[in-house]
Image (cartoon, helix red, strand yellow):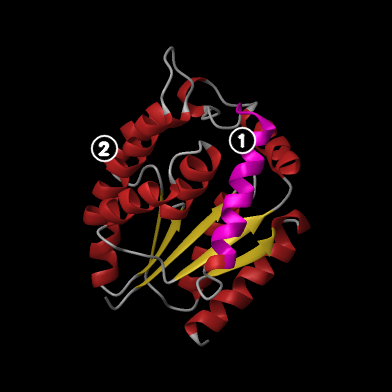
Amino acid sequence: MAGRFITLEGVEGAGKTTQIRLAAEFLQGLGHAVVVTQEPGGTPLGERIREILLNRGGFDISGEAEMFLFAAARAQHTDTVIRPALEAGKIVLCDRFSDATIAYQAYGRGLPLETVREICRLASRGLSPHLTLLFDLPVEEGLGRALRRIAGREGNRREDRFERETLDFHRRIREGYLAIARQEPGRVRVLDASKGIEPTRQEVRAILSSFLGV
């Protein structure tokens, strides 16, 4: 594949949505064709699954069902959006990918790690990011940011199902992300997201410039 696949990961409230927009503007300014997408989402099927997974409904979702729903959305997303863009030589910026499933469902929910990894591999047909930016900060700070952002939303726009989980759940997710970073230091770059938008933007630009050889 001629393109480059870059993912942004992190705990709730880490600032990925803001930074992915700024990163896209930076890369487009350098003349790159950029596709910005997210998980779950990115396709009509993915958006329907997103509504189920991120909004609190009148029913519970087991950890296993949650994992398979994320995998279904990823399979469709990979085949119809990500791979075609990469084959066309574009840079794909994706808000969450397989690392999120490993952090949330394996470390957070306690599902078997190797099983989750295999499901992720099958869903993406072995696709792995060339670079992952992991935005890290204490979960209390991140959740505070996320809940303030959500407070003004209504209905299905709230997307607060995960934010309402326990602090211990979110701490396990953070530890999972950091474990992934330790295991794959060549791919995963950890950024201190507690510094604020502008310092983080500058660090993202520096990493992207180095990665692309600018």
Q: Which mark is residue 45?
A: 2
Give the residue type at disc 1: Phe
> What residue appears at the point 26 percent right and 53 percent down from the top-left corner?
122
N-terminal-most mark, 1 or 2? 2
Residue 128 versus residue 164 in the image, above or below: below
> What residue appears at the point 36 percent right and 43 percent down from the top-left corner?
41
Q: In which quadrant of the rendered view does residue 144 lie?
A: top right
In x, y percent, where is residue 66? 39, 33
In x, y percent, where is residue 167? 69, 33
Magenta stretch contains residue 181: yes
What quarter of the picture does the N terminus occupy? bottom left
Q: Nearer the viewer, residue 63 or 12?
A: 63
Numbered range of the magenta stretch? 164-182
> What residue appears at the point 48 percent right and 82 percent down from the top-left corner?
212
Residue 183 versus residue 105 in the image, above or below: below
In x, y percent, where is residue 11? 61, 46
In x, y percent, where is residue 71? 32, 44
The kind of secondary structure the magenta stretch mainly shows is: helix
Identify the element where label 2 is drawn: helix
> Residue 29, can we see it?
yes
Give the residue type at disc 2: Leu
**Within 10 angstroms of label 1, few (less than 14), some, or many (20 or more) residues?**
some
Furthest residue in direction top, as rendered: 58
> Residue 22, can we see it?
no
Residue 59 versus residue 197 in the image, above or below: above
Residue 19 versus residue 167 in the image, above or below: below
Q: Nearer the viewer, residue 143 or 69?
A: 69
Q: Which mark is residue 169?
A: 1
Separation of residues labelled 1 and 2 (CA atoms): 27 Å
Q: Nearer the viewer, residue 28 or 178?
A: 178
